[in-house]
Amino acid sequence: MGISKISAYSLANAIIFFSVGLLVIKRLRRNTNFLVNNGITALMVLLMLSVIRVLLPLDFSHALVIPSDTVLPVIQKVTDLHVGSLTIGSLILGIWFVGTSYVLIKELYNILKTIYSIGKYRIIANEQAERVLKNHFASDKVCVFVSPDVDVPKVTGFRHARIYIPELELSDKELRLILLHEVQHIRGGDTFIKMCYLFLKAAFWWNPIVRNFELEIENMLELRCDLASTKRMKRNERVEYLEAILNVMKQIEPEKAVYSPHVSTLINERIGELTKQRFKVILERTLTCRRKFKIASMGIIISAFICSYLIIIQPVSLPCQNEAECRLDLTAENAHILICRDKTIEIYVDGEKFTTVNKKDLDMPPLCDLTVHTEQEKQE
């Protein structure tokens, strides 16, 4: 299957499928029954494939072409209009670039502000935290710092990740369960994932679906940490895990835990319905995976990803730089019509594909004078 060059239309298609993927994830994440049966893996795979789709906006030459003779041609004409020496399309790209730069600079400032704030924490010695860390997480090579300035338990950093916790009245067992959750953030590279999505959010700052999906990233990562932490626990142990989180919530003020892509927190100011869902999924999820549900979900997700490359939306006529380029005489000597197996009708000029037309256009000159071939005849 041949791959055509990347065009503005292939990029537009990729952004559409990417946005649809995010909407599907958002809908499924709110479905507690889906999470109980499938866990969070299916949604993480769908997120990964959606990102791949937008980063690789390729068109396959044998894909099903959906011709647009209304919306896309109008957009095409508008973007080709000149404002001074520049086209509207060039101005849009310029605004896109400026907006992306602004969002990146703003987010970088917020990250540096968070790092500076964390650097001013007053660290106090805590024998309990050191003992629990040494007894249960020595192989993870992480550092735990206790400070009265910490709002909620959190993880920060990449290569040298650090766990910060406030002064809490917890038993060793409860502290171990809280640290287990934070260590899962480190093991899963959650801070790195959030930073990567920051760049996507900056690149598509004008897309409200992408911009508002940041909260879903946070929710998914929290669910993934919960499920990873309780994976091998019996029901009574999972209850103890949730009780430890509740104990922490009683001693802190979650509304002060402001979101940051550089930090992963146990709880944030936007807990709301997610906390209830986290608890329900952990308690109701069976220890044995429901393999049939997971296989079916993965199959649907991967099939949808492949099919997204087999559909292309393109305008009926190709864009022109000026009128002289648009004047092309189509004759039986230099052009012919090819009807593909998927019923797409293509016009070829001098052996090269020129454009795609609708069936009704074949009755109008000069197309009515051209020779018509089918894809099967061409292969024979």
Image (tube, rainbow, N blue to C red):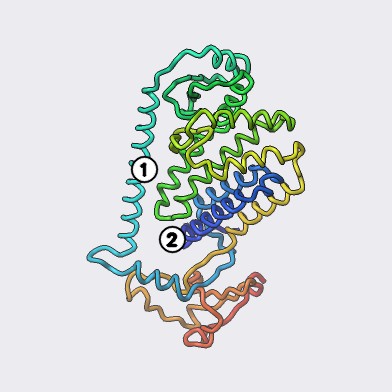
Q: Residue sitting at 51 percent across and 14 percent down? A: 126
Is residue 260 in view? Answer: no
Q: Secondary structure at mark 2?
A: helix
Mark 1 surroundings within 10 Å by alpha-carbon count, few (fewer than 14), some (14 through 19), many (20 or more):
some
Which of the pair 173/361 is nearer the observer? 173
Image coordinates for residue 379, horizontal then vertical, percent: 65, 69
Give how far apart the Cα atoms at labels 2 and 1 are. Answer: 24 Å
Above or below for 113 versus 160: below
Circle nearer the N terminus (2, 1): 2
**Picture quadrant of residue 148:** top left
Residue found at the very far front of the displayed protein = 250
Q: Residue sitting at 59 percent across and 31 percent down? A: 245
Is residue 111 in view? Answer: yes
Q: Residue sitting at 56 percent across and 81 percent down? A: 359
Amino acid at pointer 2: Ala
Amino acid at pointer 1: Leu
State if disc 1 and disc 2 touch (CB < 8 Å).
no
Q: Looking at the rendering, in which quadrant would you find the N terminus? A: bottom right
Tell me how many marks there are.
2
Which of the pair 170/47 is nearer the observer? 170
Which of the pair 262/56 is nearer the observer? 262
Above or below for 106 versus 357: above
Q: Which dot marks residue 104?
A: 1
Image coordinates for residue 75, horizontal then vertical, percent: 40, 69
Residue topped by disc 2? 8
Above or below for 359 versus 117: below
